[in-house]
Image (cartoon, rainbow, N blue to C red):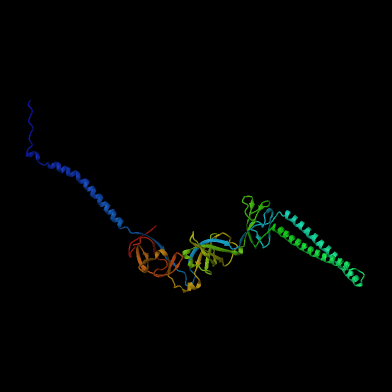
Amino acid sequence: MPDRPPTTPTLADLRIDREERASRGSRKWPIVAGAALVVVIVVAVLLTRGCRPPEVTVAAARPAVSDGAAATVLNASGYVTPRRRATVSAKITGKVTEVLVDEGMAVTEGQVLARLDDSDARRRHDAIRAARDVARASLDEIEVQLADAERTLRRTLDLREQGVSSQQNLDSATAAVDGLRARLEVARRSLSAAEAELAVTQQDLENYTVRAPFAGIAVSKDAQPGEMVSPVSAGGGFTRTGISTIVDMASLEIEVDVNESYIAKVSPGQPADAVLDAYPDWHIPATVRTVIPTADRQKATVKVRLTFDALDPRILPDMGVKVAFRETAAEAESAPPAQSLVPSSAVRRDGDRPVVFVLKGDRLERRAVTVGRPLGSDLEIVAGVAAGEQVVVGGDATLTDGQRVRVAG
């Protein structure tokens, strides 16, 4: 069969199929509706999040210190330290033969703590004493000879006046007396030298006895019989440098480091309240004794020493202690009466006026306040906040009056 020629498109072939278009539109509608729903949900979440109340931290205002009472102006921590503490050692190097002290023992001034081997020194002492005795005996002999020579000289003078004795005999008797007098002076000086040397050896013997320099308590026993001790380090592990450590318990005091930014709040004679870490419920009155006139550049602190108003056997050296520095009575009386105490972070500045935000239910109330004295990390509120009210101490810096908030929990 012969091939048919291709047909030519007509105007009827170009018409739109409305049924096929309707079916395509019906397939796109679920996609568009889903996208719109996602957009609505995202917008709702963003709007809900933007309306969520901000979170704040609150604290209760505390009752203020009663009028005229000494308030705490600064807190610090430190340790109990003695003003008199000594590690007692011998003045010489020697071997320990006896230790007469133990930890916790009370000692008196001059009490014997230990003895060293003094056998060699005692022999030297005995030799010097024997030499002293010889010098003393020699002196006695020369005194006897001098007395005899003086009698001979007197007889020679009498015989010379009678013309019986010659001038030569008189000169010989005179020379004998002068010679014995010179020997006597030498013997006396020799005896003095022997006495002085004997005193030196006696002091050497005393150096072998170790005594307490003051009354106190022995807090350590650092040597045992048979060990070598030396007043200086010998560079090895077999030579001790001390016998015992003595602490004068009557000289116990407190040593604290105060930040140099707050040292202006501390002065000698200022009252303080001390609490030992071992006895947290025991408040011990104390007084500032001195402020050491130098700062530690590494820690930016100044050392302050306080004395206990009354000592107690429970207070021991090197105990940890916390100190609250108080106002003096005059400062407390001159201060205006306060309504409450709030943390320093609760007070904000609105221009030149201090304000706080007080929590009332779930909303904030902005109040202008009158600030009194700073007491450590707190501030006195003379007017504006009553004790027991909740004040904002942390939160957004853009808080406003009447704003709804949530308390951080």
Q: What percent of the width, then of the height, locates residue 23?
A: 16, 42
Inspect this view and state whether residue 47 appears.
yes
Q: What percent of the width, then of the height, locates residue 357?
A: 37, 65
Q: In which quarter of the image is residue 185?
A: bottom right
Q: How many marks?
A: 0
Which sits in the foreground, 358 or 180? 180
Q: What percent of the width, then of the height, locates residue 116?
A: 70, 55
Name the quadrant of the C terminus: bottom left
Q: What percent of the width, then of the height, locates residue 290?
A: 54, 67
Inspect this view and state whether residue 72 appears.
no
Name the quadrant of the N terminus: top left
Q: Compared to 33, does 364 lie above or below? A: below
Q: Left or right: 125 with respect to 220?
A: right
Q: In which quarter of the image is residue 106?
A: bottom right
Q: Left or right: 276 with respect to 339?
A: right
Q: Compared to 110, does 69 lie above or below? A: below
Task: In the displayed orientation, state which residue is furthest to the top.
Answer: 1
Q: Residue visible at 80% across and 65% down?
A: 182
Which sits in the foreground, 60 or 68? 68
Q: Residue visible at 47% across and 74% down?
A: 334
Q: In which quarter of the image is residue 139?
A: bottom right
Q: Compared to 6, does 259 lie above or below? A: below
